[in-house]
Image (cartoon, rainbow, N blue to C red):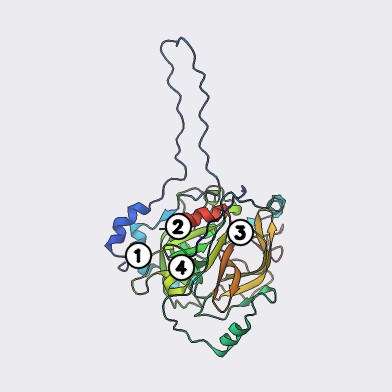
Amino acid sequence: MNDSTSSRPGRGRGIAAAIAGAVLIGLAALQPAAAHDGTRTAKAPAPTTAPTSAPTTAPTPAPTTAPSSAAGGTAASPAEIARADTYWTKERMAAATPELPPDVGEDELADALADAEAANALPARSAPGAAPKRTATTATTATDEADEADDPIGATAVTQAQRWGGQGQMPATTTGKVYFTRGDGSGGFCSGSAVTAANNNTVWTAGHCIHPGGTGPGTYYTDIVFVPDADNGLEPHGQWSYKFANTTIGWQDNGDFAYDLAAIAVWPQGSRGDLAGWVGSQGYAFGSGQTWASLHALGFPAAGYQRNDFSGNDLWYCEGPSTAAGGDIRMTCDMRNGTSGGPWLDDLQTARGWGYIVGAYSYHYLDGNGNYADQFMYSANHGDGAINVYNDVSVR
């Protein structure tokens, strides 16, 4: 893989036979380290005899962890692994509700927009996408061939979401629904994308699709699966159960939407092999900026701004430029709940089916009545936080 390196800091705010027994042996190695060591320097007990001279040692400062650092994450438990093949039934999937993006009101939005454009501390990192290694099983239609010949991507902005009709081909095969169980036992779903990675089994999504945000290291969602190319209840490529998932310290501990991003390592399947080898992968370009001439935003919306035709069961897209919104990234698009974690792709070309992930849908703005205020949607800056999380998950 052609992998160069990059990143940037953020700002502060607010499966079980296919796995086999060897998996269980290695499971302990996947347990996350604590995000903070929790240690502090203790004062020595008062001496019974006064010292001849009083020490003047300054107190040791408490350790700090940058919000853009990768958090401890969560590994699939033995119980989750044992039930992975049977847990997500069609009934459970149908009952799952879209995970709501963080609600951002007028004051929070004003604070976000007032922030300086994000700066990078780490060098930028990128890698191209790749076509699946398996032989394609879906025939290309005459319409598809015409589209590839014209390659119209980028010609016209699409700010009112349209159906992506290319199921069975990239990028639809790499884009899917992320299902999970919340802390209260209810089922939820988001959007996500297979991304190029050393383990060939990594999914990119939003932080709030694996963790509620601001509640610390012990509250990650469970039973996480990725269903690529999901289409009205169909699972043409099966379910890919998670091995490990992680987000940033900023999202885990503070619920800060400036760091609302995540990655999920999934188990390979016995019959299909690695995820990327079966469905393909999108590339990524992290730490490469916030302003892009033309991005494609993909996802499975169940709600939208002044829209009532979204069900959460179909793949839709918007296309257009992005701008810097303080330290975040903004696009004009009317997709909302259910689209969370859906990839924002630069340089998506239909002939090859992949582009570069530079963002993922995170949040929108609500007016004083709690309604969608406008057509804008926002992504966390994919700089240092994205690089740190990617580096942690992509090798698991």
- Residue sitting at the far bottom: 142
Percent x, y of residue 14? 61, 48
Q: Which mark is residue 47?
A: none
Residue at 50 percent of width and 29 percent of height: 60
Between the residue at mark 2 and the residue at mark 3, the CA separation in whole angstroms equals 20 Å
Towards the viewer: 283 or 167: 283
Q: Nearer the viewer, mark 1 or mark 2?
A: 2
Towards the viewer: 83 or 280: 280
Three-letter amino acid code at the position of disc 1 = Arg
Q: Are marks 2 and 3 in contact (CB under 8 Å)?
A: no
Q: Which residue is mark 3?
A: 288
Q: Are marks 1 and 2 in contact (CB under 8 Å)?
A: no
Between the residue at mark 2 and the residue at mark 4, the CA separation in whole angstroms equals 15 Å
N-term-proximal mark, 1 vs 2: 1
Three-letter amino acid code at the position of disc 2 = Val
Residue 153, compared with residue 31, is above or below; it is: below
Between the residue at mark 4 and the residue at mark 1, the CA separation in whole angstroms equals 15 Å
Q: Nearer the viewer, mark 2 or mark 4?
A: 2
Q: Which residue is mark 2?
A: 393
Q: Which residue is mark 1?
A: 83
Left or right placement of residue 22 versus residue 204 in this view: left
Mark 2 neighbour class, 10 Å CA radius: few under 14, some 14 to 19, many 20 or more: many
Residue 91, compared with residue 204, is above or below; it is: below
Left or right placement of residue 355 versus residue 325 in this view: left
Percent x, y of residue 152? 65, 80
Q: Are marks 3 and 1 in contact (CB under 8 Å)?
A: no
Disc 3 on helix, strand or loop? loop
Percent x, y of residue 166? 55, 81
Q: Which residue is mark 4?
A: 226
N-term-proximal mark, 2 vs 4: 4
